[in-house]
């Protein structure tokens, strides 16, 4: 309830705000009185005892709370730093594992590639060897076939057999060239012998289908044929070999040679 005061015969009602203001003025007045109560002949010592209306008390609880808060903050910062360090370590370990895994994968791929190349090389070598073996088998079959080939036992057969041997040895000559010279030299008689020419006079008469003297037959004998100078095939091939060496081919011979 508002309280009334009287100032110079007039009455005023005091509100709560007025009371607070008056209280503040009273405090300031008390302070002023305390400052002005010093005698004029006294020193300049100043006191504030009258200004303190109540003692100020500082507790330790708030300080403790502040200290605890700082400690908690430091502990939290330390834990955060440790967590960051742990994450960095884990990331580094993960990166190292990834690098190691990548390296291992690359090495495995390289080994796989090398194994595949080695296998391909072995396969190619096996294929080459098989091809060579097949080629040798084919050659042997051709040789056997040639060996198994038969010729008639007459002038035509002798010439044809001689031509096959000459071909295998690289000796030039044709059927016509051989046939023409055989008819001129021996009339196709494999046992013909010349006992009247200069060779006969010298003791080395010409013999056989192409009238070859023994020294020439032996010098130009073709391997695989008989050493008998009267053998038709041996005589023809030796004479053709001699004619190829001296005239280029038996086809170039048109008279005594």
Image (spheres, rainbow, N blue to C red):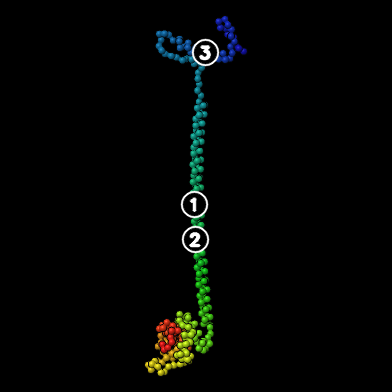
The picture places residue 2, in percent across and down from the top left corner, at 60, 12
User: Could you tell whether 7 is left or right of 204 in the image?
Assistant: right
Per the image, label 1 sits on a secondary structure element best described as helix
**How far apart, in angstroms, are the residues tagged by discs 1 and 2?**
21 Å
User: Could you tell whether 72 is left or right of 242 in the image?
Assistant: right
Quadrant in which the N terminus is drawn: top right
What residue do we see at 46% from left, 90% from top? 184
Reading the image, the residue beneath label 3 is 25
Label 3 or label 2, whichever lies nearer to me, is 2
The picture places residue 146, in percent across and down from the top left corner, at 52, 81
Label 1 or label 2, whichever lies nearer to me, is 2
Reading the image, the residue beneath label 2 is 114
| As drawn, 238 above or below 113 | below
What residue do we see at 57% from left, 4% from top? 9
Residue closest to the far front: 254
**Numbered label attached to residue 100:** 1
In the foreground, 110 or 218: 218
The picture places residue 41, in percent across and down from the top left corner, at 40, 8
* Residue 209 seen in the current view: no
**How far apart, in angstroms, are the residues tagged by discs 3 and 2?**
104 Å
Q: Which quadrant of the structure image shows residue 214?
A: bottom left
If you read the primary sequence from the N terminus, does the residue marked by circle 1 or circle 2 appear first? Answer: 1
If you read the primary sequence from the N terminus, does the residue marked by circle 3 or circle 1 appear first? Answer: 3
């Amino acid at each position: 309830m508002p309280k009334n005061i009287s100032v110079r015969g007039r009455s005023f009602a005091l509100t709560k705000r007025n009371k607070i203001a008056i209280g503040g003025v009273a405090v300031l007045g008390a302070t002023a009185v305390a400052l002005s109560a010093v005698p004029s002949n006294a020193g300049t010592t100043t006191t504030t005892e009258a200004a303190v209306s109540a003692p100020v008390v500082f507790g330790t609880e708030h300080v403790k709370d502040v200290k605890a808060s700082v400690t908690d903050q430091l502990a939290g910062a330390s834990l955060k730093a440790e967590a960051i360090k742990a994450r960095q370590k884990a990331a580094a370990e993960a990166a190292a594992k990834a690098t190691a895994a990548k390296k291992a994968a690359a090495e495995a791929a390289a080994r796989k590639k090398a194994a595949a190349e080695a296998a391909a090389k072995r396969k190619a070598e096996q294929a080459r060897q098989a091809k060579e073996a097949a080629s040798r088998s084919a050659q042997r079959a051709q040789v056997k076939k040639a060996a198994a080939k038969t010729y008639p036992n007459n002038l035509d057969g002798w010439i044809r057999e001689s031509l096959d041997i000459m071909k295998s040895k690289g000796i030039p000559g044709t059927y016509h060239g051989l046939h023409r010279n055989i008819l001129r030299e021996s009339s196709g008689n494999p046992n013909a012998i010349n006992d009247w020419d200069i060779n006969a006079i010298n003791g080395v008469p010409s013999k056989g289908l192409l009238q070859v003297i023994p020294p020439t037959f032996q010098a130009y004998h073709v391997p695989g044929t008989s050493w008998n100078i009267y053998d038709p095939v041996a005589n023809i091939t030796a004479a053709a070999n001699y004619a190829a060496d001296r005239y280029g081919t038996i086809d170039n011979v048109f008279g005594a040679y």
